[in-house]
Amino acid sequence: MKFIHTADLHLDSPLRGLERYEGAPVEAMRQATRRAAENIVSLALRERVDFVLIAGDVYDGDWRDFNTGLFFARQMSRLREADIPVFLIRGNHDAASQITRELSLPDNVREFSSRSAGTETMEALGVAVHGQSFPNREVTEDLSQSYPEARPGLFNIGLLHTSADGREGHASYAPCTLDGLRAKGYHYWALGHVHQREVLCQEPWILFPGNPQGRHARETGPKSCTLVTADNGRITQVDTHEVDVARWLQCVIPAEAVRRPEDLLEWVRHWLEKEAGAAEERLLAVRLRVTGHCPAHGQLTAQSERLVAECRQLANDAGNGRVWVEKVKIDTQPLVAAAGSGPGTTPLDDLLRYTRGLPENPQELQAMALCLEALGNKLPAELRQGVDGLDLQNLKHLAALVPEAESLLLAKIQNPEAIL
C-alpha cells in the first residue's frame, strides 16, 4: 500500500511587493504553487498510490475568483480518473469561515467535517482515516483529543492541522502533544500547518511534510511531499519527493574573506554556478547577505548599487535566466570598529569617539548643517526630492548619515588608494 501525505499548498498565495524588483520573475512565481500541486498529482499517478492525504490549507484564504477552486478541482479529477481517493481537512487559511465561495469537488474527494472528528474507512485496503477540519481560523483547543480511538484490525491514520507543541513563525492553532497523539494508537499521523518538513516521531510515524512550494524568502530550500509505503500493517518506507518548481535560497558570505569588491563577486559567481547546477531546471530566487568584519567594508557600502547589478548579471550568466537575485544585503563592519570605544588616545580613537557622539550632540550637528548648507544647495534636484531625498539641514536625517560616513572614512584610512 502506498499513499502521499501533503499539506499547505496555499494555492494562488499572493506575492507581496515582488513587482517592485527589477527583473523579478513575477509570473513564474505567481504560478509556482499551482505547478507544485500538479507535480504532486503526477507523482501520485506515476507511483500508482492508493490514496492521497491533504492536511489543510489547500487555499490561502478567500479566492479572488473561481479560477483557484476550478484549478484544484481539475487536479482532483486527474486522480479520480485513476480511482485514487483524496482525504482532506481544512486548516486555518481555508477554514469554513475563510472561504466565502464554494465549488463542488469530484466525488473521490472526501472532506472531513468541521463540527466534530470523523472517520473514513477503505475496507479493501484495511485503512481508517480520522480527521476534523477547522470551523474557523483560530482554533485554540486540542482537536486531537476528540479523535476516535484506533479501529482494531485496520491501519489507522490521523489527519490533523496543528502547531503541535509550538513552532517558531507559526500561530499556535490546535496545539497538541506528542504523548497525546501516541495515545490514540494510530499507525501514522499526517500533520499540516508547519511549512518546514519535520519528523516528530517514528514509532509511530508523526510528521509535517512541509509546504510543497516556498512562497517567499523565509521559506528556503527544497520543498516536498511525502510518499509512504506500508505492508501488513507496518510502515516500511517514508520517502521525501521534491515537487517545488521555484526555490528560495539564502547565501551568507563571510565578510572576512572579502578584501575588495572583486573578491565578493568571485565568491558569488562560484556559489551561483553550484546552486544553478543542482537546481534541476528550477527557478532560483536568491538572497545574498555579506556579514562580519570586512577589510573592504567601506568599498562595499559605497558601491552597493553597482554590486547588486553585478550580482544580478552573474545570476543571469549562471542560470540562463533561471536564477534571480532578489536582494543583496551588505551587513558588514569595518575591521577597526572597536577603536574609539575605549580609553585609547590615538588620533583614530579620538576621531571615532567624535563621530559616534555626533548623533546625540545637537549643537555639533547644527554646526555641521551650517557647514554643509552650501553643498546641499548644489546637489541635483533629483537627490533632494522624494521620501529618500537628502536633506542636509534636517538634523535627524544628518545623524542617520553619520555611521555611513564613518564607514567610508575608515575604509579610506585603511586603504588610501581605494576608489570609494
Image: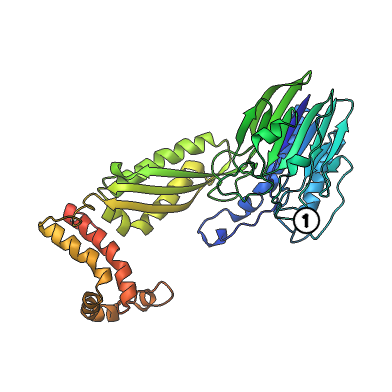
Residue 272 sits in quarter: top left
Q: Is residue 117 visible?
A: yes
Q: Is residue 415 visible?
A: no
Where does residue 192 sit, x and y in percent of width and height?
A: 68, 42
Is 371 situated left or right of 42 in this image?
left
Observer-nearest residue: 364 or 20?
364
Is 46 situated left or right of 29 in this image?
right
Label 1: few (<14), some or many (≥20) within 10 Å? few
Residue 254 sits in quarter: top left
- SS state under label 1: helix
Q: Is residue 95 above or below residue 188?
A: below
Q: Is residue 371 above or below residue 324?
A: below
Residue at the image position 69 percent from the left and 49 percent from the top: 10
Q: Quadrant of the C terminus?
A: bottom left
Is 415 situated left or right of 309 in this image?
left
Residue behind mark 1:
67
Where does residue 248 sit, x and y in percent of width and height?
A: 54, 45
Observer-nearest residue: 305 or 313?
305
